[in-house]
């Protein structure tokens, strides 16, 4: 089996596991965490990159799917360092801070 086919199979399995985790988080959180952990392991083993938008939906420490109000607290902080979105996992307390970047370009006069 060549690398390309291994990676495509890995991508399919990762997508399936992450969908299952999203569905399962309200019923059985431990099972959802296990699905996320397996997806991240498969990605590491097959050397497949999980897109940033997808990676940010899960806690890096405890692998819990982050759902605002249920498993995560989301705040917007404004300060001298710029504007940031602060996401706190309500299960383990892990905090992630993401800078909010201003859009560049666009029509003049708006």
Image (cartoon, rainbow, N blue to C red):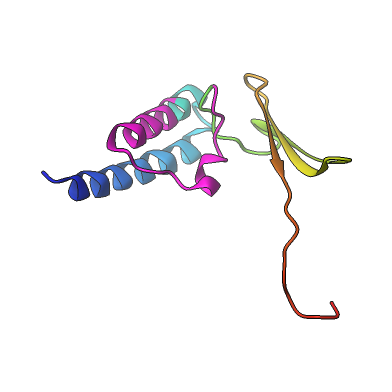
Q: Residue drawn at (56%, 30%), measured in percent from left and top?
A: 59
Quarter of the figure with residue 48? top left
Question: Residue 3, position in %: x, y?
Answer: 19, 45
Q: Considering depth in this image, is 47 or 9 the residue closer to the camera?
A: 47
- For the C terminus, give its image quadrant: bottom right
- For the N terminus, give its image quadrant: top left
Question: Residue 90, position in %: x, y?
Answer: 67, 25
In this rendering, the count of numbered labels is 0
Horizontal relation, residue 66 to residue 49: left or right: right
Q: Is residue 56 magenta?
A: yes
Q: Residue drawn at (53%, 22%), measured in percent from left and top?
A: 62
Q: Is residue 62 magenta?
A: no
**SS assignment for the magenta stretch, majority:** helix
Q: Considering depth in this image, is 13 or 80 the residue closer to the camera?
A: 80
Horizontal relation, residue 13 to residue 103: left or right: left
Horizontal relation, residue 107 to residue 46: left or right: right
Question: Residue 88, position in %: x, y?
Answer: 70, 29
Looking at the rendering, the stretch of residues picked out in magenta corresponds to: 34-61
73, above or below 11, in the image:
above
């Amino acid at each position: 089996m060549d690398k390309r086919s291994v990676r495509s199979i890995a991508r399919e399995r990762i997508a399936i596991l992450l969908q299952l985790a999203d569905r399962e988080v309200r019923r059985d959180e431990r099972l959802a965490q296990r699905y996320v952990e397996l997806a991240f392991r498969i990605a590491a083993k097959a050397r497949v990159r999980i897109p940033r938008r997808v990676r940010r939906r899960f806690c890096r420490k405890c692998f819990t799917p982050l759902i605002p109000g249920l498993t995560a607290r989301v705040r917007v902080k404004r300060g001298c360092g710029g504007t940031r979105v602060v996401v706190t996992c309500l299960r383990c307390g892990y905090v992630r801070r993401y800078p909010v970047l201003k859009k560049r370009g666009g029509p003049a006069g708006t």
